[in-house]
Every structure is written in structure tokens, then in C-alpha cells.
């Protein structure tokens, strides 16, 4: 992968729908989600950041520059601290992202766009995307105005959309983009274990 690519795992949320538990520490197929994500990202970059409280020997933990602003605050911190021009961004509760899929997203990031984002019938997935540093000003403006929805940020950026058909080349789109918001979500993910690597 290119030397100008960094990665950031957004792990700063309060997980209010999951009783405040650290979702990155949940175990899926015998490994924590954080370990699974680090393993998927390590072949792509030597610059892995964790925005939030989680820690890992293979990543730098960075603080939000603006506290209490959710994923947008994590993205802002990642874009400020990343060594690379493009930053692979993954929410800390997505256990099934793969190196091949993330490499494809990163490969779509050109100078002509600000973000590469998957889109399925469920909508955009801005917490499994590749943001270029050119997105930083728009993110900072929204933070300053306390307009914190990640989906709304896309309206301010040059977007390259990755459609379901392209996602499916790397596996089932629902599995690749699955995340854990609630205990019920985690139970559903556990049910998927053993069906695919």
C-alpha cells in the first residue's frame, strides 16, 4: 500500500446503547474486535491511530482536539495527526472489515476527491471510509458550529461512492460493514461466527 496512507480506528464513543462497554474489546471468533482491525490494517500502513480511550501496542492513541463530539471529533483528530494524505477510517465496533476491502477503498482515493465511502441499500457508511486530508477544513467547520452528524459532512465533500456491487467483490456487504451498536447486534454477529473467515 502507498506510503501516504494512514489508518484511524474511532474508539471514543460512550457506547450508551451497549451499557458503556468498550466495544473494541468484544471478542469475535476468539479475538477482540480491535485485534482483528489492527490485523486488517497493518498490511496497508505503518501509521495506525486510535482516536479514543482504547490502546494497542501497534497503534498510536490520539486525543480528540474537540471533546465530546462523537465520530466527527475522532475524524478531525485523525486528519490532524495522520502522517498520510489519505486516512482509512474504521469504527471500533466493526469486526469483519478485511485488508482487501480496505485496500480497495484506499486505492479509490485520488486527488480529485475528499472521501471514498461505501453505499448500500442501508445508506452511506461514513465510519468505514477513506478520508483525504482535504476533508479536514470541512470537518473543523462543522465541529466549530456543533453540526456533528457524519452523514451531513458528506454534503461538504467531494465524494466517491463505492456501490454494493463493488463491495460484494470482497464478501457479503452486510458482513463487511456490520457493526455492534447494541447487545442484540453483538448476538447477531456471534451467530455469524464460523460461516466466513
Image (tube, grey):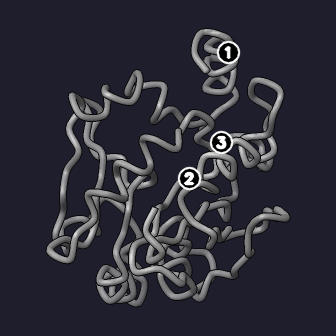
Of mark 3 and mark 1, the one earlier in the sequence is: 3
Label 2 sits on residue: 91
Q: Position of residue 125 (x, y in %)?
A: 36, 47
Mark 3 vs mark 1, CA separation in Å: 22 Å
* Residue visible at 56% across and 53% down in the picture: 91
Number of disc labels: 3
Residue 174 in which image quadrant:
top left
Q: Position of residue 106 (x, y in %)?
A: 37, 59
Disc number lying in front (3 or 1) = 1
Q: Secondary structure at mark 2?
A: strand
From the viewer's perspective, tell me whether residue 39 is left or right of residue 124: right
Mark 3 vs mark 2, CA separation in Å: 15 Å
* Residue visible at 77% across and 43% down in the picture: 19
Graded by Cα atoms within 10 Å as few (under 14), some (14 to 19) or many (20 or more), the crowding at tag 3 reads: few
From the viewer's perspective, tell me whether residue 85 is left or right of residue 35: left
Mark 2 vs mark 1, CA separation in Å: 20 Å
- Taking 120 as reference, is 13 above or below it? below
Label 1 sits on residue: 193
Residue 7 in which image quadrant:
bottom right
* Residue visible at 18% across and 57% down in the picture: 160
Graded by Cα atoms within 10 Å as few (under 14), some (14 to 19) or many (20 or more), the crowding at tag 1 reads: few
Q: Secondary structure at mark 1?
A: loop
- Taking 7 as reference, is 189 above or below it? above
Q: Position of residue 82 (x, y in %)?
A: 54, 81
Graded by Cα atoms within 10 Å as few (under 14), some (14 to 19) or many (20 or more), the crowding at tag 2 reads: many
> Closer to the camera, 196 or 55?
196
Disc number lying in front (2 or 1) = 1
Label 3 sits on residue: 17
Please identify the quadrant where the C terminus is shown.
top right
Amino acid at each position: 500500500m502507498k506510503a501516504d496512507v494512514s489508518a484511524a480506528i474511532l474508539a471514543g464513543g460512550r457506547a450508551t446503547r451497549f451499557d458503556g462497554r468498550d466495544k473494541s474489546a468484544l471478542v469475535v471468533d476468539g479475538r477482540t474486535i480491535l485485534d482483528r482491525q489492527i490485523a486488517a490494517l497493518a498490511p496497508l500502513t505503518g501509521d495506525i491511530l486510535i482516536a479514543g480511550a482504547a490502546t494497542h501496542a501497534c497503534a498510536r492513541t490520539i486525543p480528540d482536539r474537540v471533546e465530546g463530539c462523537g465520530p466527527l471529533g475522532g475524524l478531525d483528530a485523525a486528519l490532524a495527526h495522520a502522517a498520510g494524505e489519505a486516512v482509512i477510517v474504521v469504527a471500533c465496533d466493526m469486526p469483519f472489515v478485511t485488508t482487501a476491502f480496505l485496500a480497495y477503498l484506499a486505492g479509490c482515493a485520488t486527488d480529485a476527491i475528499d472521501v471514498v465511502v461505501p453505499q448500500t441499500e442501508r445508506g452511506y457508511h461514513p465510519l468505514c471510509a477513506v478520508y483525504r486530508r482535504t476533508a479536514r477544513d470541512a470537518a473543523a467547520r462543522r465541529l466549530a458550529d456543533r453540526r456533528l452528524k457524519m452523514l451531513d459532512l458528506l454534503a461538504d465533500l467531494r465524494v466517491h461512492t463505492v456501490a454494493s456491487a463493488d463491495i460484494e467483490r470482497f464478501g457479503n456487504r452486510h458482513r463487511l460493514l456490520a457493526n455492534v451498536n447494541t447487545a442484540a447486534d453483538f448476538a447477531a454477529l456471534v451467530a455469524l461466527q464460523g460461516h466466513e473467515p
